[in-house]
Image (tube, rainbow, N blue to C red):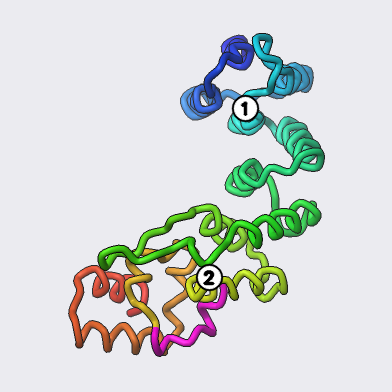
Amino acid sequence: MTIIELTIDERIHRSGEQVLENICRIANTKAGFIIKDANFFDRLILGITTPCKRCYRIHNIEYLYAPLAISDQNGKKIIKQKVIEYLENKFDPDFYERGISLDIFTKEDHKDLLQKYIAYANKCCSSYDVKEERGIWIIQNYSGFNCISCLAYLKVDFKHEDIQSISKKSDYYNWLINFDTYDYSNFNTKWLTQLCPEFIKTKLNSIESLKEKVSEELKKDYDNNLAEFFIKYLN
């Protein structure tokens, strides 16, 4: 426990969250180390949320997530409660996203935070987030892309009015959100190999109009990457 506390106490002007996360992960995977001492978690959280002694700021609130790897169920509850308190006081979409990836949140609990996140998604998504450059499609702004992926991970209903409003921002977002009802007659198949998120790939197999479109494109202008995508996800 001492090395964990020392790592937290070393709040200098750099990010140490990755260091602490690595220590906790190694302690758990190599030694099966789990902390059950509630008092330790109280000290841990106090150390994380206490401002830096040099500049009086909290440098990296994501320290809160690192000890999850070595927490028992009570410890996880303590950490989750502190995360919620922080977000309710000052909503941070990036911090919330990290919580989603660590299964801290579901779509059923703390719906007020989910609504704030959906509002953030509406604000950050735009028609300029993807563009074609010399025949290659690139993502210029990953914030919107990450939002849609996180909402999909939560299994949020994409028919939700506020999410449907995002689909109107661009044809690309319309596809991400409404891929099952999208009109594939003029679909750019390069999106499949260059812009397709993981959450969509496994759901495309049942869309016959997409299969037909890709088949037509391969017959007209064969592409190895597109052919591999077809075999893996559409065949």
- At x 71%, y 69%, the residue is 162
Q: Any magenta on residue 185?
A: yes
Q: Position of residue 166 (x, y in %)?
A: 62, 69
- At x 45%, y 84%, the residue is 207
Q: Amino acid at mark 1?
A: Asn
Q: Position of residue 40 (x, y in %)?
A: 73, 17
Q: Which residue is mark 2?
A: 173
Sooner in the amino-acid sequence: mark 1 or mark 2: 1
SS at mark 2 in the image: helix
SS at mark 1 in the image: loop
Instruction: Tell me if residue 39 comes above or below residue 206 in the rendering.
Output: above
Crowdedness near tag 2: few (<14), some (14–19) or many (≥20) residues, C-alpha within 10 Å: many
Circle on res. 60:
1
Instruction: Tell me if residue 3 comes above or below residue 120 in the rendering.
Output: above
In this rendering, does residue 37 appear at all?
Answer: no
Q: Position of residue 27 (x, y in %)?
A: 52, 23
- At x 73%, y 37%, the residue is 83
Q: Amino acid at mark 2?
A: Tyr
The segment highlighted magenta reads 176-186
Along the horizontal axis of the image, is 162 left or right of 13?
right
- At x 51%, y 77%, the residue is 179
Viewer-nearest residue: 199 or 223? 223
**Which quadrant of the figure has residue 177?**
bottom right
Viewer-nearest residue: 65 or 62? 62
